Structure formats: structure tokens, C-alpha cells
Image (cartoon, rainbow, N blue to C red):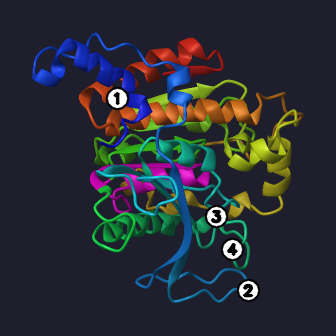
Amino acid sequence: MAPTRALGRLAIVALTSLGVLAGCGDDAGAPPLTSEEVLTRGPFAVAHEYFDLVDASRPTPPNASDPGAPTRTLKTNLWYPLAAAGGPAAAPGRHPVILYSHGFMSWGTEGRYLDEHLASHGYIVISPDFPLTNILAPGGPDVNDVVNQPADVRFLLDALLGFDRQPEHPLFGAVDAERVGAAGVSLGGMTTSLVTYHATLRDPRIRAAISIAGPGSMFDASFYATTDAPFLMIAGDIDAIVDYPSNALVAREMAGAKGTLVTLHGATHTGFANQSSEFMGAMDNPDNLGCAALTTQLEVDDVDFTALLGGAGAGIVERETPLPCSVSPLPTSIRPWRQHDLVILAAASFFESHLGESAAERSAAARFLRTGLPAENPEASVD
């Protein structure tokens, strides 16, 4: 028998004791999850593969001095739970999928701390280097190519479902097409919102979405009305790059009943990236470095998201937002490693509450997200 995912362990024990597995009772008596439980690495060894996927149906636009290409090549990271340490095959059974999108001037392992954690709990996670917004994009990163990234995400999901049908592939028979979630940081958070909710760019197979510090000022209520997929915004309240009040608070309001906001007090924008804990742990505020890099690459006045993304007919509106990196000096932040722990707590419990295998697992995770997370972690609040 495959090991039970750790996030659902307490719920399964409670179900057994209540006799629910025999068909009676409910999960009301299941003990609550704790932060320690959610942060514990899962029971699975994790495989990581890195390979190219080529979408021959769509071109890569010209970019500065680069002429573009007739195809789009996605250098792709894949994490999945192993049946046994050292073996290539995925763990038995069908596993939920997370489509992870990186931020502007970043790359596909940006969310590795979250991706590996989810995979250890039985998730399949796929994350590309987007062709024109990654740090090494030919011609330099171009934020305007975000309009093409929702189709990249759809292409990745199609590729996973193709692997599921290939007997020689480690993911043969392992992909659960009914349990698909999407997540991303910054421009990847915006990509996640687009591929989940945009009237023409969305993929209806996505059942739950997380934007981590993603721009949200341009989305109105009609944007989120295309699907019932639940939405989680995770944001830092001292984010110097994507302003918290005009993005996170607006996104929470516009998403309405399907939306939840987890605010990380003292969290930065740059601190959401995996590399921040590796290289910026001693900095008073990692956004000092993030802003120094961003302001050399991004011409904000050249980006017209309203026109780029379809305007009012697609739920895209213009709102006043502060320019990135307009606050100085920056306040002292929480440490990146702590910020990562809080992201894991919020993201893992959110996905489990909607994609978990049993009603008991989903219920326990939902209760933790709403009550346990803020009660046990003073840096976090949930609305």
C-alpha cells in the first residue's frame, strides 16, 4: 500500500476511530492540523527532472535584437513522488497536479522550496522557464510576453496528460486530470490568474489558483466570474515591488466569495523566491536587491496591461498603483526562510483543502488555513 500523505494523516486516523470508513458518522471530530504537521516533509522521495518541451503550434515573438522563433521552447522542471527512492516510477495511484509559474527575471526553480514540499506529499509539480520573461531570455526579459504565458501553462498540462498515457514514462497512469491547481509568484502570479480566470486565456481544467505577490490591480469582479475555482492571494504587506494595498487588497475584494487573502506581515516581494533564502538571508530587506535588479530591466511606462489583455470586455481595468520600488528607505523584513515556511503553510493547506483525496483531508486543511495558520503564526493573517 502506498504511504498516506502526511497532510491527511490526522484526518484518516480520526475517520477510522469514528467509524466513517465503515459508512457512518462524519469528520467533525477530526483533530485539527498544526503548523508542524503541515511543514513536515511528506512520506515520498521526490524525483526532479529538467528537460525541453517544444510547442510547435505557437511562435516566440521577436524581442529586441532577437528575431524570435517559429516555436516556443519551455525548459521545464518536473517534480513528482517516487514509488521508491532511487527508482524512476511515480508512486502508485493518481496524483494531483500543480502548474507553477515563475516571476519576471526569474526561472523555473524559483519556487523549489514549495514545489519539493508538495511533491513529497504526493503532488506532481511542473514549472517552466518561460521563453521571454526568464532572466536569460534572448534579447532580455520582456514583461509583455505575459500574454502568451497562459497558453504555455495549458501546453504543460497537455504534456503531463500525454506522459500519463505513455507506458514507458515514469508518470504513466499517475496524473489526476480532475485535481489540477496553479500557482505562481509575481508575474507568475498574474499568469496564474490569467490562466484560471481570463475569459479567453483560461484553462477550465484548473480547479484552484494561488497568486503569490502577483499584480491584481487590473482585474475587476467580472474577471473572476468565469469560473468557480477558488482563489488564494498570498502577499507581503511591505512588498516594495507589487504594492500590497492596490494589488493584494483589490484582488481579494474583486474575487469576492471565492477569494482568500493570506497577508504575511513584514514579508517582501523578493523574499518569496527560493534564491532569497540562499543568498539574502542576512539582508535587512531583500527588496533592496530585487529593486536594484528590476529597475535596470523594466520600463513600467511601456506596459499597457489593459490593452494587452483585452480591456473591459475581459475584466481588465486601469487603476492607479504606485510605481515599483518607490519607497525608501525600506523597513526591516522577516527572514526569507521564515517567509518560505509561511508560504508552505498557506499554499499546502489551500491546495489540500480543494484537491485533497478525501473529504476529511479537505476539511482539516480548510480549518487549518482559516484558524490554525493565523493562530499559530503571528506574522500571518487570513481574510
Q: Earlier in the sequence, mark 3 or mark 1?
A: 3
Q: Where residue 233 sits: x, y (%)?
A: 51, 36
Q: Earlier in the sequence, mark 4 or mark 2?
A: 2
Q: Earlier in the sequence, mark 2 or mark 1?
A: 2
Q: Which residue is mark 2?
A: 65
Q: Which residue is mark 4?
A: 137
> What SS does tag 1 mark?
helix
Dot 1 amino acid type:
Ala
Q: Earlier in the sequence, mark 4 or mark 3?
A: 4
Q: Residues within 10 Å of mark 2 (few under 14, many from 20)?
A: few
Q: Which residue is mark 3?
A: 143
Magenta stretch: give its range: 176-205
> What SS does tag 3 mark?
helix
Q: Residues within 10 Å of mark 3 (few under 14, many from 20)?
A: many
Q: Where residue 133 sits: x, y (%)?
A: 64, 66
Which mark, residue 66? none
Distance between mark 2 and mark 1 Cα atoms:
46 Å
Q: Residues within 10 Å of mark 1 (few under 14, many from 20)?
A: few
> What SS does tag 2 mark?
loop
Q: Residues within 10 Å of mark 4 (few under 14, many from 20)?
A: some
Q: Is residue 189 magenta-colored?
A: yes
Q: Earlier in the sequence, mark 4 or mark 1?
A: 4
Please tell me whether residue 303 is drawn above or below residue 375 in the rendered image.
below
Residue most extreme to the left: 23
Distance between mark 3 and mark 2 Cα atoms:
16 Å
Q: Which residue is mark 1?
A: 257
* Whether residue 155 is visible: yes
Distance between mark 4 and mark 1 Cα atoms:
38 Å
Q: Earlier in the sequence, mark 3 or mark 2?
A: 2
The residue nearer to you, when weighing 283 against 239, is 283
Nearest to viewer (mark 4 / mark 1): 4
Report the residue at 46% width, 15% height from top: 371
